Every structure is written in C-alpha cells, then in structure tokens.
Amino acid sequence: MDAHRDAADRLAVNDVIRRRRAAFADAARRGLYRPELERDACGVGFVANIKGERSHDIVEKALAVLDNLTHRGACGCDPLTGDGAGILLQVPHEFFVKESARLGFTLPAAGEYGVGMLFLPRDPARRRLWEGVVARIIAEEGQRLLGWRQVPVDESQSGWLARSVMPEIRQVFVGPGAAIRDRETLERKLYVIRKRIEHAASEMGKPDDEIFYVCTLSTRTVCYKGLLISHQIPRFYRDLADPSMVSALALIHQRFSTNTMPSWERAHPYRFLGHNGEINTLRGNVNWMHAREKQFASPLFGADIAKLAPIIDPAGSDSAMFDNALELLVHTGRSLPHAVMMMIPEAWQKHEQMSDTKRAFYEYHACLMEPWDGPASIAFTDGTVIGAVLDRNGLRPSRYVVTKDGFVVMASEVGVLDVPPENVLYKDRLQPGRMFLVDTAQKRIVSDEEIKESMAARRPYRAWLSANLVRLEDVPPAPPDREPPACDRATLRVRQQAHGYTMEDLRFLMTPMAINGQEAVGSMGNDAPLAVLSDRPQLLFNYFKQLFAQVTNPPIDSIREELVMSLKAAIGSEQNLFDETPEHCHQLELESPVLTNAELERIKQLAIGSLRTKTLGTTYRVADGGPGLQQALEALCAEASAAIAAGFTILVLSDRGHDAERAPIPSLLATAAVHHHLIREGTRTRCGLVVESGEPREVQHFCLLVGYGAGAVNPYLAYETLVAMVGDGVLKDTDAEAAIANYVKAASKGILKVMTKMGISTLQSYRGAQIFEAVGLNRALIDRYFTWTASRIEASASTRSPRRSPGAITSPTTCRRGWPRMASSIRAGTTSGGAGASTTCTTRRPSPCSSTRRGPGSTRSSSATRPWSTRRASGSARSAACSSSRRVTPSRSARSSRGPRS
C-alpha cells in the first residue's frame, strides 16, 4: 500500500515539475514575461448572493475562485503541499440534519445549535483525551453535547508532507442549555467555551508534534481549511461536493506565508476573516490588548468575562491575532463593520472632505484603541454580512464584480471567475480605507458612505469630544513661577558629557535639524560599527536597530502622502473596551510627540477632570553602582503603580536634577521598564507616559522611546544645546526660538519617515510597537525590561574587552581624551553561561519545508531571539531527506518576539 502511494506521489511530483518547466519555456517564447520572477502575496476573496438565497452554486463558484488563486499560494520541496487554503461558509443546516440522522442524534432548528470544526491528534488515546476535555467544558458551561462527526476526507489528495502532520478532523455539535435565551446568547456562550478549550490546551500542555485546534465553533459559520493547495480543497473535503452543502456566501483564502512556518491551523480563513497583507504594529497591538484585559466588564458576559483572557493566542500568526481582536470587538455588542472600522480606520486626521460626524467617530474611537496598522486587504463575514476593507494606504489590491442576476465576486485580483460580459452590472476596485459590504439580511449592497455615516450617528461623538477631549493648545500656559529653567551654561558641558553627547551629534545631526528643519543628508545605509563591539560605553539607544517590513511594499513618501500619515495621538487613561461613554475620550490630544519645554510645563500642571499629571524622577545614586540602578528601576516601577492607584493619568519620567551624586537612568531603559511593568500589572492603559530627558537628541532616539511606550518626549538638553550654539555663533542667521522650532519640525518629519519604512501610517499604532531588534544585550535584561524584543546575543565572550563584565549594569566611568561617555551603560550578554546564556530552541511540530519562498532566510527576517533550528517531519524519511532545503524556524518564544506574520 505504502509503495503504491510512494510511486503515485513521485509521479504527481514529476508531473507538476514537467508542467512548470513547460510553462516557463512557453512564456520565454512569448516575450519578456517571466513567471519565475513573480512576487505575489496571499489570495483572498468571496462570493455572495445579494438576496441571501442559499445554494450549492455559491460553494462551487467560491471553489472556482479559490482554484484560480492557486498562484497566490506557496509550496515547498513537496509541490503538493501548500501553505494552506480554505473556505468559510454559512452553517449548512439541511446537510447537517441529514448527517446527524445518519449518526443517531437530532439537531434543533437552524441557528439553535453550534457546529465546531476541530483538528485533533491522530493518536486514538490522545484524541479521546481532548474529546473528553471538550465534552467536560461544554457540560461545565451548561450546554448540551449533541454528538460528534468524523469529517470524511480523501488523504490522497494532499501532499505527502502535509499528510505526515495531518490531524484528525472532526465536528462537534452543541445544543443550547436552559439559560440560553436567543441565538446571540448562544453565540457568546460558544465563544466562552472555545476560549476555555484553548486555555485548557495551553495549561495542560501537549507534545510539539500534536495538533489540537478549534477552527470554528459557531451557530453561523463553519470553516473547511487545511495545509492544502487551492485545487485540493474540494477533493480533500468530500462534504463540499454534496448538493445539500448550501450557503448564500463563501469566503475563501489561499495562503502565502511570509515568515511563519505553514501548518494546518494557520491556514485561512479564520473565524471572521481572510487576510492578504501583514500587521506591522503587531507586538504593540498585542501588548495593549493584554493590558486592557483587567478592565473588561460586561453585562452580556457577566462572570464569564474572566474566562476570556488572554484574548490573543500567542501561537497564532498576525492574521490569527487580528481575528482574535476582531472577534472580541464583535462580542462586545458592536456590529462587524463597526469593529472593522475601529481596527482599520481610514485616514481621517487630514481628510478635508470627510464629514464632521464621521471624523468625530474616528477621533472618538482613537481614544479607545490603536489601529492595527500595515498593508492589508481583509475579507470578513459573520455569516450574515460579508465584505472587504483596504488599508488606508491602499497597499494591497481588491477588485469586485456585481452581476445582474444578484451575485457579487470580490478577490485580490481580476478574472478569478468567468462572468459573461452581458451579465456584469458594474465592477470596480476597493479604494484605500474604504469598505465594500453585502448584507444578505437586507438583501442589498451597503455603500461605504452609508455604513460609516450610520456608525457615526450611533452616538453624539462630536459632543462627547467637545466636552471631554483636551487639546494641548487649549491648556493654560504655566504660571511664571513654573516656567522651565533657563539654560545653565556653567553646567552644560558636564550634563552633555553625562548624557553621552559628542561633537558629531552637534555638528552633523543637530545643526542641520536646527538650520534647515530636516535631518542631515548622508550616504545610503549605515556603516557604523555595532555598539556591542566598542571598547567604550555606548548609549543604550545604539544597541537597537530598526526593523523593516517583512514584505516589499510600494514606497510611501511621508510628505507627499501626508493625507494618510499622522503624528496626532492622545494620552491619558483608557476605559473599558466593552462600553462607549463620554469618559472614554477624556484624554489629552497631542499634535506631535516632540514637546517643547513650554508644552511640557503645560502638561505638568494639567488638572482638568481626571487628567492629572505626576512627575517621577529617573535618577539613581552613583555610589550604588549597578545594583543601585536596578533598585532604582524597581522603585520607579513601584512609584508608577502607586501614582496610577492615586488617580494620576499622565506620568512624566524626568531625569532633571542629576548631578555628581545622582546619575540619570538611561531614558530608554526607564521608559521600557515602566511600560512593561504596567503591562504585566494590567494598568498600562490607565496612564500616558511622557519622557523628560537630556539624553535623546536624534530621530532614532525619539522613535525608540515612542516604540517602547512613550506618548511624548521632551529633549530639554537638546534645546539647551541649541540655545548655546546660537549664543556661541555656531548656528548663524537664526535665533534660539527658530532653531528649536526647526529642530522639533525635523524630528517630527524624521519620525514619519521611519514609520513609512514599516508601512505604518499613524503614531498611535507605532507607539509601543517596539519594532526593533537588540544586538548584544543581555537576555535577562531584554526579558525583564524590553519584553518580546527580538535580539541577537553576542556569539562569544572572548570577543569582548577584558574590562567588560558580561551581563553587568555598570556605573559611570571617567572620560578619556575628553570624549563624553554615557552615565550608565548596559553591557552585552554572553552565550557561554550567565544571565545572557543562549539555549537551543525547541520546535512545535513537524511542518513542511520550503526552499523557494520568502521567509526567515532573508536579511530582513534574521532577527530571531535564539538560534534557529530545522524542523523535521517525524517518521518520514522523505521529510528528513529534504531538511537541508527546508526553511528554518525559531522556537515558539522566538517567533512571538517579532510577532508572527500571516
């Protein structure tokens, strides 16, 4: 039997290779086109009957679209194993009634029961164990387990590599308990059951090569997906060929993984969406959601609310995590379009033609949560409405066709379904930030304008904003006795040395910013030696490198495309995400994250409603050395917690007042320490952070501080330096006020430029996203104060100067040759033991190899936390044979450090 299957596999592989070579040769004969040079992303789309009429024809059309999107997927060394494909349908009640009768149990009426699609272990004992867990949780939640069904599949239709890691695929049917009042209540209870099942899987643990995953558990939709190529889906899942498998809508997806290993559970669609693109602010989005969880409260869930956390599955891709957050927002009582508008808002800040009511909607919701930013085309459905939305930059394609006989076809490209020209009513492309929506309950297409204007009219958002949102320019100026201190020329040089200023900083970085209002122009690239290789103490900023988008995106000019770029953001306390009240927008709105001294003083004396500011010192005793610095950080975190408990909603981290006895804590270390401490404590969203420091002076410094949670930065020593340079005649033809204004302008423009490199449009989503890698820092320090940051740990302690102690936090040292040195340095780690020791990673489960796609082998994706190891498909000689050409992947913790991608 195995020999015959091996022979069939070899014939299939040879046939695919033969057809590909023939296609390449034919293309070469035709002209310049080379299909081997194609660069595509995921394929996504949907088919729907506008009138909501269910039919098997919709399923067949959707599968045809999926088949035509095959080229948007990927395969590895086994050309019959893809990155994943799937289809999301309305629950086919007639089909399941027929199947339940055959299996000996009875289903309630349509919509009064839930259907779960589960991936379970192939081992019978382990499968029974997890089935028992599912049954127990259903019973504990007061619902009825109606029965199980094994989903019939044709394993021969999948690639041999996919078969080697294939799960057992089963469906579970859940009936309502006595306390269930309606379909919505049952849907929420099924959500609670699924979250409890996921948490049980995490707590109980399972072997790395075991799959246990709930694809969908809903009264509305069911998903058929897997580690397959598009054309394999209808042949693999026999259910899809049954005429009673009917639906009025179908969402499909063909996956092209960018930097996560493909697996059965990572195939799309997820519970609500299919995603083409990437979420570049993922780490920050996940952190902020985690910080909000302790504030959750809802009469819809009652005591069940405590069972939902953590909302985000850390093992998922960026698409899976986006789906987790979208699912939560829908279960808060918001409609699906409302939730999508919150997560992917259009460019509203500078849109002059946008109505004031719609702008008020977006401005209000910006106080509730940050955008999930990045190039994306997302198709979504809840089983009643189905639609698509494009990111605000329009960096991913989406096209749709509406036919005269009432069908809609949307996909990531044109020509995915043969539609006779005479049957085309109209066709168009989705515009940046716009939404296309089909409502099968209303039996019509709802325009983008109607959707958003109706959402904007739900609440008096403009009135709430006018009464509660505080703009910095409206805050009274500080009284004369609170004016910022003047430049102290007598101590300026000493303070510059304490913060590590160099002549290069003054001449080549700050001077052009102060004179021209822009960063200095230099050669392409950065050839500066790594900070970890230096014999001299370095600024902590220098140990971090900006990461870039994993997928090539069209270039964005932050100046010419300023309509979609924004530095505006609000700081203060967030409220419960399940509610919408006027207090939700009681925050302080800033136009730029770079504050002048006068603006900072306004914030320091702020006392409007619940907006109150507390200043926390960020210095430590020089005599206490490294242990003293660590104790000062712990005390700072404790002070931050106490200030929040006392009702302060804005915390200023200030290193003013340092002297010979007290040294400044590196501003990045202080900011990240407080930020992550409050995240772990669950109080981070109850305050905004402002950094007052003499250390930051260049764009990278501001970006790092914002990237690790700062809402605004006041570089007071940079301003004093500019004033002194004007006074000394170094800066000519300008005065101090103009120099500072130009400097602030240049810093703001520089931050925008850095954001565009990541495909990020708003400072609000960039804040806390920590899109950096650390080179040479101690692993213990990273885990404690820069949690989830990707890092490359120094290869050997022998490459370090003998004077340096691995993993140490050191105190100030004397300058040599008059060169400034930072007051406190964070030393590099080591792989030869100690706090920075590196360990060999472990793998989750066997997964297909790929030698022909984008992935961690590329330069931009090489920032794993620990050494990467090759994944092997256990029990398969063929899999082991191709391991040398397989993509490699970090351990689960390493993948999570960057934020896995779709």
Image (cartoon, rainbow, N blue to C red):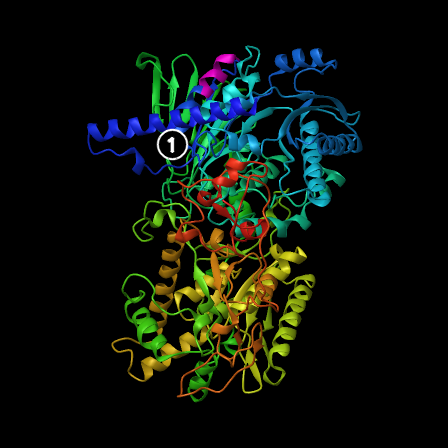
Note whether 756 is above or below 313 in the view shown: below
Note whether 715 is above or below 97 in the view shown: below
Q: Is residue 588 left or right of residue 561?
A: right
In this orientation, which residue lies closer to the viewer: 74 or 645?
A: 74
Residue 61 falls inside the magenta stretch: yes
Note whether 11 is above or below 307 in the view shown: above
Residue 27 in which image quadrant:
top left
Identify the image quadrant of the N terminus. top right
Residue designated by label 1: 430
Image: magenta residue range: 55-63
SS at mark 1 in the image: loop
Q: Is residue 108 left or right of residue 590?
A: right
Residue 178 screen position, x and y as percent:
80, 25
Residue at the spot 45% in from the left edge and 79% down from the top edge: 536
Q: Main secondary structure of the magenta part?
A: helix
Q: Is residue 729 left or right of residue 597?
A: left
Residue 93 screen position, x and y as percent:
63, 15
In this orientation, which residue lies closer to the viewer: 170 or 406?
A: 170
Residue 212 falls inside the magenta stretch: no
Say which amino acid is labelled 1. Leu
Q: Residues within 10 Å of mark 1 (few under 14, many from 20)?
A: many
